[in-house]
Image (tube, rainbow, N blue to C red):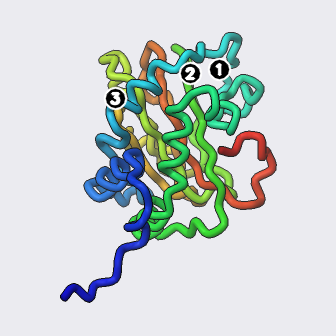
């Protein structure tokens, strides 16, 4: 007789995005310097990666390369309820990261607390010349993950840059950029990161997945 209690989520319908991510998270590579981050492979199911790459959303025109994403807030694209209705892959990804098993696994792996957080997913298509100055994410973000969506060799050095903090913001390394690769970190006062230490050309596609606290002001961005 098996007296083991069922795992949380055992009675839930199959969710391929959640299953893929949980498998990926279990195999992630944990780095601890200059802060904790986790490198990922095979984050999402292949069919969902293909669908994300082929979303009929054109890169924004007129983006200002200022080193800050917020400069182009009016041009940014999120997996809002409206976009989930338009594009089934957006709904599948949102459902995957709303899965309670995913939230529990992230908390266990990283130590963050996702209680009462909300999901925010951004679809990024960064063109040649894009860069981000070293920065730390704002405190209302409780989790940050980037999933890269291109296998263009010209972008192999285009992953998120990891830096030490002030005063020099010394470059340490970059997360490998490639199709269905990714990186996780928990925003903190020392999680300095950016983009652009290595020059790259082409269309740098990615999604950014955040869990944010109830203090998040721009609620229209939420899933």
- First along the sequence among labels 3 and 1: 1
Q: Which residue is mark 2?
A: 130
Which secondary structure lies at badge 2? loop
52 is higher (above) or lower (below) than 60: below
The image's mark for residue 179 is 3
- First along the sequence among labels 3 and 2: 2
The residue carrying pointer 1 sits among few (fewer than 14), some (14 to 19) or many (20 or more) residues within 10 Å by Cα, namely some
Q: Which residue is mark 1?
A: 65
Q: Percent position (x, y) of residue 50?
A: 38, 25
Tags 2 and 1 touching, CB below 8 Å: yes
Q: Is residue 29 visible?
A: yes
Q: Residue at 65% x, 29% y: name it.
A: 77
Q: Residue at 38% x, 38% y: name it.
A: 174
Estimate the spatial distance between the alpha carbons at disc 3 and disc 1, rounded to whole Å.
24 Å
Quarter of the picture containing the N terminus is bottom left
39 is higher (above) or lower (below) than 36: above
Residue 172 falls in which quadrant of the image? top left
Which secondary structure lies at badge 3? loop
197 and 85: which one is in front?
Answer: 85
Q: Residue at 41% x, 45% y: name it.
A: 17
Q: Residue furthest left?
A: 1
Q: Percent position (x, y) of residue 170?
A: 47, 44
Residue 221 falls in which quadrant of the image? top right
Estimate the spatial distance between the alpha carbons at disc 3 and disc 2, rounded to whole Å.
19 Å
The residue carrying pointer 3 sits among few (fewer than 14), some (14 to 19) or many (20 or more) residues within 10 Å by Cα, namely many
């Amino acid at each position: 007789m098996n007296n083991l209690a069922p795992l949380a989520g055992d009675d839930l319908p199959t969710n391929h995005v959640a299953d893929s991510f949980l498998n990926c998270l279990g195999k992630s590579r944990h780095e601890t310097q200059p802060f904790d981050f986790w490198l990922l492979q095979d984050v999402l199911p292949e069919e969902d990666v293909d669908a994300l790459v082929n979303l009929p959303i054109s890169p924004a025109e007129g983006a200002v390369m200022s080193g800050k994403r917020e400069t182009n807030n009016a041009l940014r694209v999120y997996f809002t309820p409206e976009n989930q209705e338009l594009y089934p892959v957006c709904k599948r990804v949102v459902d995957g990261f709303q899965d309670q098993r995913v939230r529990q696994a992230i908390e266990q792996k990283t130590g963050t607390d996702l209680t009462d957080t909300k999901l925010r997913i951004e679809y990024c298509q960064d063109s040649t010349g894009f860069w981000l100055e070293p920065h730390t994410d704002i405190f209302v973000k409780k989790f940050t993950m980037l999933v890269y969506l291109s296998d263009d060799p010209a972008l192999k050095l285009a992953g998120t840059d990891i830096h030490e903090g002030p005063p020099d913001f010394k470059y340490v390394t970059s997360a490998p950029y490639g199709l269905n690769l990714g990186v996780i970190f928990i925003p903190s006062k020392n999680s300095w990161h950016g983009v652009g230490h290595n020059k790259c050309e082409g269309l740098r596609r990615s999604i950014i997945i955040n869990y944010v606290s109830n203090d998040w002001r721009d609620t229209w961005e939420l899933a």
